Amino acid sequence: MFLEVVYETGRMSVMEVDSEAEGMEGLRVHHQRAMKGEPGGPLGQPAERIAAVYVYDEHPNNYNEDQTMSADVAEKTVAELIKTTKDKNGVVSLDNLAQQVRSLSHPMNNESDIEAFGSRYKNKERKSLDLKFLEGATS
Amino acid sequence: MATIVFNRMAQMITDYTLGASGSITPPAAWTVGLSTTAVGSGSNMMRNSVWSVTISGSNVNEIGSTTPAGYARQTIAKSINTGSIDWGTSSLDNTFSTGGSSTTADQVTFGAFTGAGPSPNGANSWAITEGTTINAGNLHVAADTAATRTFAVGDTEKVTATIKAG
């Protein structure tokens, strides 16, 4: 399984683990270091407190990696993009339209669409972890 | 610090940009991986290197292939200053011999690592690649880390990728 970790700094990472318990162990240790002002890794960077953890069965990057869609959906989607991108003279920039089409298979949300400590990915998480497992971090 | 541009990235210029190829195309998003293989200078990694679990020749071996222990590839969005983690505005170094345009991505974080750390452990380089399957997908560029990074429980690793084309 995969965990998307959102740190209090706004940074995030994806972890592959065999179980939630395994992931919680590593995250608890890292969070504990942050609470004590200790380094977060061999580079010596500060550890960061953990603000949210989302659980996925697959890596959340795996979002339409083949970059395909059914012809019916493509027809409707492109028609809608043409409608929303044309100017007042009914002209469409093909470069802009191509960019919009390319981003249909993009796995990440735009920064402006992400709530504080929300998931960065379009794929829906299976659940989020209750962060009580971090509570013992300062003891 | 040694760096390398793999053939697939070069083909992005020759085939995709110049020729509008429909088969040599960028991925939906870039991913970043950590490798035990050092870039070297034409011996460890080559322009035609591939990800492989087999340690032989110029193969590139990814950490965590036996036991991820918190390791997974990280995503860099295929956008400029709009995605949550993506590329910055490019800038020009106008130096005739060594110049070019460069862009720096938002920093990505690996981990926190778990248990006894990933197996294999010990990152000597990072690579811009595609997909999320360990030891698979096209390689685009790689660069050595400043030192071997060996990860233990609770560790994270930060990589800030700068790509210069010139």
Image (cartoon, coloured by chain):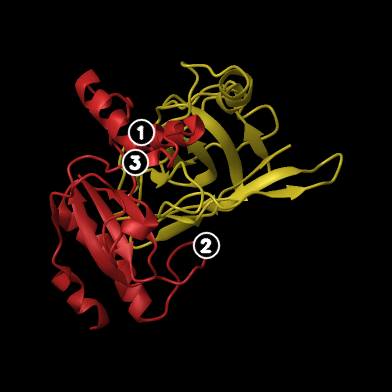
Q: Amino acid at mark 2?
A: Leu
CA distance separating discs 2 and 3: 47 Å
| Chain at numbered mark 2 | A
- Between circles 2 and 3, the one closer to the viewer is 3
SS of the residue under disc 1: helix
Disc sitting over residue A82 in the figure: 1
What color was chain A assigned in the picture? Answer: red
| Chain at numbered mark 3 | A
Q: Are marks 1 and 3 in contact (CB under 8 Å)?
A: yes
Outermost residue, right side: B96
- Residue occupying the point 28% across, 35% down: A80
SS of the residue under disc 3: helix
- Between circles 1 and 2, the one closer to the viewer is 1
Q: Are marks 1 and 2 on the same chain?
A: yes
Rendered location of residue B94, percent (x, y): 82, 46
Chain identifier, colour yellow: B
Q: Amino acid at mark 1?
A: Ile
For the C terminus of chain A, give its image quadrant. bottom left
Q: Which residue is mark 3?
A: A84
Classify 10 Å Cα crowding around label 1: few (below 14), some (14-19), many (20 and above).
some
Residue A96 lies left or right of residue B71; in this view the side is right
Q: Which residue is mark 2?
A: A43
Rendered location of residue B95, percent (x, y): 84, 46
Classify 10 Å Cα crowding around label 3: few (below 14), some (14-19), many (20 and above).
few
Residue B133 lies left or right of residue A94; in this view the side is left
SS of the residue under disc 2: loop
